[in-house]
Image: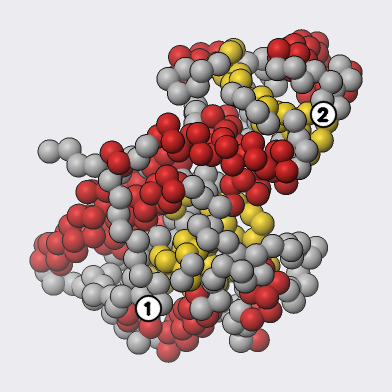
Amino acid sequence: MLLSPAAEATSAPSRAIRNRRRMVRLSGGSECAMLCPMPELPHAPELTTADRNGIDFPKLRAGRLARLQTMMKRYDLPVALLYTTANIRYATGADVMGVWTAGTFARYCLVPAEGAPILFEYKGSVHVSQKVVGDVRPAYTWQYGGVAARDKAREWAQSIRSALRELGLEHERLAVDRLDATGFLALQDEKIPIVEVLPATVDAREVKTAEEVQLFEINGGIGDAILAEFEAAIRPGIREYELLAVLSDALIRRHGEALFTRLVSSGTNTNPWLTEATGKVVMPGDLVGVDTDAHGYEGYVIDISRTFLCGDAPTPEQKEAYRVAYDCVMGMHELVKPGTTFEEFARKAPRLPEAYAAQRYPTMVHQAGLEDEGPGIPYPDDTRGPRRIMPKREFKENMVLCLECYAGKVGAPFGVKLEDQVLVTKDGPRLICAYPYDAKLLG
């Protein structure tokens, strides 16, 4: 029987527990990595899992476009040229080969502040996007043209002017999100004035529509399920890239799309954080960290971090690091409510003990939607490298936030990464993914 993503997500944690017990029996009773039941996370009730068949996709697409066009009018942007894959999907509902097209200039769209967008699609995929977009045309591309690229880009710029003329916007400023130097110079040669679209796209995407919230509910259940399978697979002798494969397989079987990082590490590879999966073998007593960093169902981000123990007896030092990260994330939960400014959050958020400060994560909070989104909230006293922007913004209802912390002392053989993904409600944060923390490490 085929299950919907919601049904599969709901059943997967219990199935993973049964599989763990079976593995214990088959292995003669060894319980390294057979983790005990976890406590429910305090402070943030779990979102219910929605049925994907209940999503009104025309309403989803119309609502996102309306938000974008409202913000374009707010910033006096008559028309936008979008190349970023998440922006194209937000404006049109169409996504084609998102991993590949994210690094190319193969598809783009023109979005007027009033009226329907025009999608210029990769030539071979026009038929795909025509299922959801009314006006789809073959895209120009010059990226692999070598010395002929400049001439092809001039043709493209002339086609942009022609489309603007159709829209009655030929002499208006064109708000752009991303171009290479060849495209930029071609628009200059065509004397098309360019401005930045970022203020409008950021403001549009930061507050989620009702249909987007439904999609996050579905993806929250998927996130819980893929973490259950990941945890169940931890055992001595498995390699980090094999655990990454478990994560990817569990995602795609539930209608997710792709992982956008490879952040699985164990033992000494967990300190400092951000070493991606290698061939390192997981050993008894290792900490195993994972950041899901996944595009789930319909492309919405599943971004949770957990650290697990391969074994049953954590060291006092492992428990200390885990508690530091856990207390940090829990303290952030307490500060999430509509109206709190980013600066106020940064000032009041828990500070890591001095021994852990040198290797802390670059940000405390970032946003999530069709990609990891910003602006985020950095540590205000972080002097490592160029200072990050402290945005003059505030939390709003229906924003999606990722609250994260890394705790690892310099030179220690392990570190702990924890992260929760929450929806901002009028009553505070609500968990999108509710996969529990490791009770042994918390104890």
Q: Residues within 10 Å of mark 2 (few under 14, many from 20)?
A: some
Identify residue type, mark 1: Pro
Query: x, y (%) of residue 173?
Result: 82, 29
Residue 294 appears in the figure: no
Look at 49% across and 67% down and name the residue there.
426
Q: Mark 2 = which residue?
A: 173
Q: Is residue 171 above or below residue 46?
A: above
Give yes or no for contact between labels 2 and 1 (Cβ–Cβ under 8 Å): no
The disc at residue 100 is none
Q: Quadrant of the C terminus?
A: bottom left
Lateral position of residue 61 relative to residue 108, left or right:
left
Q: CA distance from mark 2 to mark 1?
A: 50 Å
Q: In the rendered structure, which amino acid carries the disc numbered 2?
A: Arg
Screen quadrant of the N terminus: top left
Disc 1 element: loop
| Residue occupied by mark 1 | 42
Residue at screen point 47% across, 56% down: 303
What percent of the width, then of the height, locates residue 192?
Answer: 85, 22
Numbered disc in front, either 2 or 1: 2
Dividing the picture into quadrants, the one containing residue 57 is top left
112 to 261, vertically: above or below:
above
Secondary-structure class at tag 2: loop
